[in-house]
Amino acid sequence: RSISLFLGLHARSQLRDQPRTTRQDLVNDLKTAGTTVSKKTISNTLRCHGLKSCSACKVPLLKPAHVKARLKFANDHLDDPEEEWEKVILSDETKIELFCLKSTRHVWRKKKDEYNPKNTIPTVKHGGGNIILWGCFSAKGTRRPHCIEGRMDGAIYHEILANNLLPSVRALKMSLGWIFQHDNDPKHTARATKE
C-alpha cells in the first residue's frame, strides 16, 4: 500500500515533470527510502495510475520562433471556408533515411499526452544513406513523388516545379485561381523560383 502511495505521488509529480524516469530510477528511489520492490511491481502500480511505458514520439526540432509563426498561421486561417482550401496545392521535400540507427526512448505518460513536448524526441535530418523526395497535394488528392538526384539547390527546385507542378495541377483538376503554397526554405524564396 505504501509502495502504491509512493508511486502514485511519483506518477503525479516526478513522472509528470520527468517522464523519461526509468523503472530502475524508481527502484533506486524506493531503495533509498528503505523499500525494495521489483520493476514489475512498479510497472503494475503505474499502470493502475493510468501510466504506461511508451516510445517517445519523434517530432521536428522547432525553435520558439517557428512555434510562434506556425501558431500565428493556424490562427490567421482558422476560420477560412473549406472552399478556400480546395484552391490550395501544397508541396514540400522530405529526406528519408535509409541506413540509420533508430534509437527508441521510453516515457511514462497517459494516452492523451502523446505529443506533450516532455514526451517526444526532437528529430533532425541527418545520418546515413538517404533519398530526398518532392511531393505535392491538395484537397483533391496527392501526386506521385519526385525523387531528387544529388544535393538539391535552387536550380534543381526550379526544374522540379517546371516538370512537376503544372502537370500535378492539371491531374488534380485544380480550378482557376489555384494557389501554390510551400515553406520559406531559401530555395523556395529565391528570386529565380519566384519568377
Image (cartoon, grey):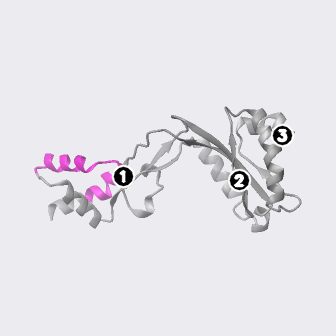
Q: Which residue is more in the foreground, 29 or 108?
A: 108
The amino acid type of the residue labelled 2 equals Arg
Q: Nearer the viewer, residue 21 or 164?
A: 164
Q: Which residues are magenta?
A: 9-34
Marks 1 and 3: in contact by CB < 8 Å? no
Alpha-carbon neighbours of circle 1 within 10 Å: few (<14), some, or many (≥20)? Answer: many
Q: Give the labeled residue for mark 2.
A: 144
Kindly report the distance in space between the C-alpha atoms of the residues bearing marks 3 and 1.
Answer: 44 Å
Quadrant of the frame with the N terminus: bottom left
Answer with left or right where residue 12 lies relative to residue 141.
left
Q: Is 65 left, or right, of 166 in this rendering?
A: left
Give the vertical position of 112 relative to 164 (above or below): below
Q: Residue at x 24, y 46 (%)?
A: 25
Name the spot of residue 162 as percent of width and height, x first: 83, 43
State which tag comes first along the sequence, 2 or 3. 2
Q: Which mark is residue 107?
A: 1
Reply yes or no: does residue 158 show up in magenta.
no
Pointer 3 residue: 194
